[in-house]
Image: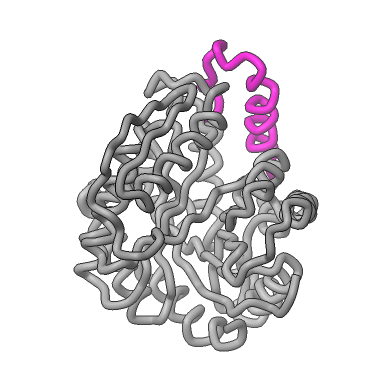
Amino acid sequence: MGARPVTRFGLFFQASEAPGRSHAERFAEMLDLIALGDELGFDVAWLAEIHFGGAFSLLSSPLMAVPTIAQRTRRIRIGTAVVLLPLHHPLSCAEQAATADLLSGGRLEFGVGRGSIPSQFHGFRVPVAENRARFDEALDIIRLAWTQERFSYRGKFYQVEDLAVVPKPVQRPHPPIRVAVHTAESFAHIGDKGLPIYSGTTTTPLPQLRECMALYRERLAAGGHLWQRDQMALMLPVHLGDSGAAARDAMRPGVLQYYQNLRTIFAQIPASYGDHLPRLRSIEETIANLPFEKFCRDQAVFGDVAEVVDRLQAARDEFGLSQIICWFDQGSRLPRAEVERAMRRFADHVMPKLA
């Protein structure tokens, strides 16, 4: 795998609804926290894309937020986590992302994925069975749109006839592309393509991640792809308290609320999902029976400074992480002051030991 990469630090935002706060207040709070992250030295702010579930997330159009964030900040990069390519026309997506890159001064990190939440595909009337093929075609078209003056494309779902797509992004040949992966099948598929990846422990617990990363490395090598400097980014729920017990107690309400919301979303699975039903029902069952203590062990890093440093250092070294992305507000139940305090502690006491 080569020398250990330089570690970058990210912030993840899902911006779900919160008791007593309006949607406008939640967006304003997110912008304030990103501005704080910029001051504290975090490298990237990652914004989710989720549709039709405000209790789970208000962020349905992350690319639209990029220019506003750029105006509020000086240096932090702005990532999408992730643009759900099967739900968008790739030409429109290429135009919007290039515009975001231009208006942010070349700070866009283009995270993309297929998506897995049933209600999103049902709402947009996109057959979930087509999501991988649609994803592959869309990504091909977007890269061509950014790198070619004119191009044509013939696919099963999309056809392009001698078009010049503008604007072109600032970053050349294009903004960094990172693909979300959460299942062994996805790790293998993207390993074959040699693309950098983004994963999260909320959907891929650490024991499962070990198996998936071994498969990803195997497929990278088989395709002749080298492990790049910024190959692997991992998102984890993180909280720092005066003690490990205090950190876990503070996060318990938010974590339980998050998984209750997620369970509700996955329970709404149309019968038309056919072959995908067993896997989705398995996810629903896992969510319903997830003990909080097991979550803290396998899917989150809640603790005092020493525990957080030790666990993140171990994960970085085991998985070759080039970017550690912290979700400081899972479930949106922490007071804002406590989120800010955790971010400051992380910047002051964790970053220097892991950088």
Q: Residue at x 68, y 71 (%)?
A: 316
Question: Is residue 85 shown in magenta?
Answer: no
Q: Quadrant of residue 338?
A: bottom left
Give how far across and how far down residue 221 sits, in percent: 76, 57
Q: Quadrant of residue 173?
A: bottom left
Q: In the image shown, does 172 or 340 lie closer to the viewer?
A: 172
Give the prevailing secondary structure in the magenta stretch.
helix
Q: Residue at x 45, y 48 (%)?
A: 82
**In this rendering, does residue 124 appear at all?**
yes
The colouring scheme, among rainbow, by chain, secondary structure or one colour, is one colour
Q: Residue at x 76, y 68 (%)?
A: 318
Identify whether 20 is placed above or below 350: above
Identify whether 286 is placed above or below 1: above
* Left or right position of 109 against 290: left
Question: Is residue 287 shown in magenta?
Answer: yes
Give how far across and how far down residue 156 sits, in percent: 49, 22
Q: In the image shown, does 69 or 265 lie closer to the viewer?
A: 69
* Left or right position of 174 against 319: left
Q: Residue at x 41, y 44 (%)?
A: 83
* Left or right position of 309 against 15: right
Q: Quadrant of residue 287?
A: top right
Q: Quadrant of the N terminus?
A: bottom right
Identify whether 65 is placed above or below 349: above
Report the magenta residues as a range: 265-291
Give how far across and how far down residue 100 sits, in percent: 27, 56
Identify whether 323 is placed above or below 88: below
**In this rendering, does residue 335 appear at all?**
no
Q: Residue furthest top?
A: 271
